Amino acid sequence: MKQQTQAVTQEVTQVSSFPPAPNSAATGVLKIAVAQVNCIVGDIAGNASLLRNAALAARAAGADILVAPELALCGYPPEDLLTREDFYRACENALIGLARDTQGIDVLVGHPELAVTGCHNAASLLRNGKVLHTYHKWRLPNYEVFDEVRYFKAGEDACVFDVKGVRVGVNICADVWEQGPAEAAAAAGAELLLVLNASPYHMNKQQQRYEVLRERIADGGMAVVYCNLVGGQDELVFDGASFALNANGELAYQATSFEERLDILDYANGKICSGAFTEAASVEAEVYAALKLGVRDYLGKNGFPSAIIGLSGGIDSALTLCIAVDARGAERVRAVMMPSPYTAQMSLDDSRELVKALGVRYDELIIEPAMRTFEQMLTPLFEGRPADTTEENLQARIRGMNLMALSNKLGGIVLTTGNKSEMAVGYATLYGDMAGGFAVIKDILKTFVYRLCRYRNTLSPVIPENIITRPPSAELKPDQKDQDSLPPYEVLDAIIKAYMECNASPREIIELGYAEADVRRVVAMLKRNEYKRRQSPVGIRVSRRGFGKDWRYPITNRYQDEY
């Protein structure tokens, strides 16, 4: 709770240092505070404190109303906490307390509500110590990572109220992605629409949000303020990126992404006429920020004191290490290199250069003695059988065992280094390089790994050029290269993206110009390795579809694809 409230406490200081605001009723200006906050699922008291601090800061800055994200009081997504009646009671008590403690400013806050009509995803207006109005979300998403139909009943009534003479309507997140709720608010007289959101990040999503909101307000004549959650929650990362549009679709305010904010907007004469602007970042910068925030919050919110990463001298572990250091600080990250007889000197040299540049603790553990021990133990059982991937996988499992031993002894969490391309085709070892607690780049295709490394080096050149340019290899046998057993990554990633993210059939992928042999091979590998993915640690989602909540394919599966 202390860490959680610290950022908004800083915002309180910053906002409170503004010159005193004129009385908005006298000037005809409605001042709206947008609380882009980082909530923790289930920390109801901590979240209430966070919102209380934001409201007090907004009030000090002369704001008339504070808007908080969807389900901010309990965190999003609360998942099966929503099956507990005591959870709803705790939220109700916190809501009443928040209303009591935030008088002098209206507060519009998201929370779950157990009502006579059922369980609802709700937003309530708090005014003068009371819960004055409550809105129930109409559209309950049941796709991608969302499962709200499991928990909530849909609302059906518009909610419009008066703030300083302005008619204000309320929607919650998915309400604005379909027709109906926004139009109902306009029909009920709203001239300004406040939208509470817990909209998770994926690449190129912000432009979609603009387009959807412009569709919703095109006929209603409303300006809109979109307040979004920020922070990491298991595999999801919420980017914030709150914004406002005027009734003509003009962008009037754009918050910084991936950080907590408390911004004050002025609404006057039917327009949002003042608000901060942050320029859009490159997709590489966005994704890197998402991964960094995901790591920071997964470790911080779950109480892991440090991160442990197995280095290989390759690009995936280099990127994972950089993200961990940028997220948690070099003093909280430990790197371990575990060379075998097949590890190239180049890999050792590059790893040493990388950790020196990053300033992390670094250890080298030679695994050859363990390899010999396993060979002696298993030779009688393997008699008459040639060496194959079994011996290669043993090396990965020895490394995984060492990392988990360090994790148990030191209390740090092992961050795995496998990318999405590897997870798709099973190019990873169960209980070996898949052993760990959090998969940082699980949703990053190999070709994008290279782009992220290039981007990271623009911030400071820490990744040796040799790591980026050398052919990738698992180094589990002499002269091994990834492309000995996989198509070129440009081809592999394109097929994975088409089949897995876009649901294209193999026939459609072949029609795009990819060789049928490659398509058949990749799709077969992808389907065959579902059992591995089910045993992999949770990882950060940054694409439209990751191997997590929004990938639910059966392990036992004989469906024949269309060719």
Image (spheres, rainbow, N blue to C red):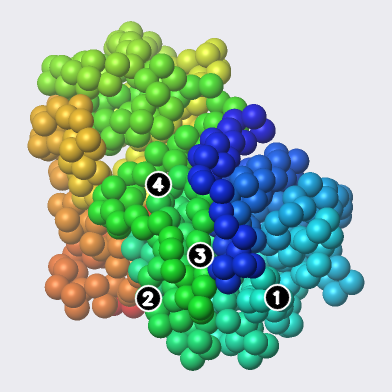
| Image quadrant in which you'd find residue 506 | bottom left
The numbered dot on residue 162 is: 1
SS class of the residue under badge 3? Answer: strand
Residue 400 rendering spot, x and y as whole percentages: 42, 25
CA separation, marks 2 and 4?
A: 27 Å
Q: Residue at x 36, y 27 (%)?
A: 325
Q: Residue at x 27, y 21 (%)?
A: 358
Q: Residue at x 74, y 82 (%)?
A: 157
Residue at the spot of label 2: 250
CA separation, marks 2 and 1?
A: 24 Å
Residue 124 rendering spot, x and y as whole percentages: 74, 64
SS class of the residue under badge 1? Answer: strand
* Kind of residue indicated by mark 4: Ala
Q: Nearer the viewer, mark 2 or mark 4?
A: 2
In this view, which residue lies farthest toward the right? Answer: 116
Cβ atoms under marks 1 and 3 closer than 8 Å: no
Residue at the spot of label 3: 266
* Kind of residue indicated by mark 1: Asp
Nearest to N terminus: mark 2 or mark 3:
2
Give the answer, above or below, for where 340 lies relative to 236.
Answer: above
Number of residues whose C-alpha sits closer than 10 Å to that of mark 4, classed few (under 14), some (14–19) or many (20 or more) = many
Residue at the spot of label 4: 290
Give the answer, above or below, for where 383 lies relative to 280.
Answer: above
Nearest to N terminus: mark 2 or mark 1:
1
- Of residues 194 and 560, which is closer to you in this image? 194
